Image: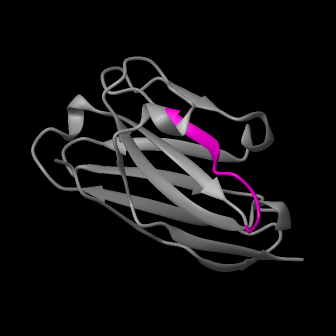
Amino acid sequence: QVQLIESGGGLVQAGGSLRLSCAASGRTFSSYGMGWFRQAPGKEREFVAAISKRFGTTYYTDSVKGRFTISRDNAKNTVYLQMNSLKPEDTAVYYCAATGYSGLPQRPPQYDYWGQGTQVTVSS
C-alpha cells in the first residue's frame, strides 16, 4: 500500500511558477514509476508527466514540454512537478500517482495509487 499526499498548489498569475510536491508513504517508493495528471472542470483526467522508477527517464504531454519538469528524490520518497510559464489553460486539480508498470505509462488505469489532488489556478 502506498499513500500519496500532494502539496504546493495555489493561485498564480499567467507566466508565473509553482512547484508541486507529492510525498509517498512506505519503504518501496523507488519500486514505483510516478506520474502527474490533471483534471479541469468538465474534462477527463489527462496525463501531464511521468518519471520511471529506475533511471529517472521522463516523458511529458506536448502541451507542457519545455515548461514543466518532473523529478524524484527517492531518499525523501517525494516526486516533484516544477511548473514554469504557467498559462490559464493549466488550471486544474493536479494528481500524483504511482504505478507498478515499467516504462512511462500515460493512462490512468495503469496507475495503482492516487493522491487526493491539489488545485492549481492560473489567472490571466
Return the residue nearer the eye: 18 or 51: 51
> Is residue 46 a member of the stretch shown in magenta?
yes
- Residue 52 higher or lower than 8, as above or below: above
**Which one is nearer the viewer's eye here, 35 or 39?**
39
Colouring chosen for the image of the structure: one colour
Q: Residue 119 occupies which quadrant of the picture? A: bottom right
Q: In which quarter of the image is residue 110?
A: top left
Q: In this view, does 53 lie above or below 94?
A: above
Q: Is residue 42 left or right of residue 101?
A: right
Instruction: Look at the image and tell me in which quarter the C terminus lies.
Output: bottom right
Residue 17 at least partly seen = no
Position of residue 116 in the picture relative to residue 47 (left or right)? left
Q: Where is residue 46 in the image (x, y as percent from the top left)?
A: 66, 46
Q: Which residue is at a point 22% across and 34% down the rendered structure image?
A: 30
Count up the numbered dots: 0
**Residue at 50% from the left image edge and 26% from the top image edge:** 105
x and y, in percent, of residue 111 in the image:
41, 37
Q: Residue furthest right?
A: 124
Name the residue located 9 percent from the left edge and 44 percent from the top edge. 27
Residue furthest left as drawn: 27
**What segment carries the magenta color?**
41-50
What is the x, y in percent for residue 123? 82, 79
Q: In the figure, 114 relative to 100: above or below?
A: below
Q: Which image quadrant is residue 116 in?
A: bottom left
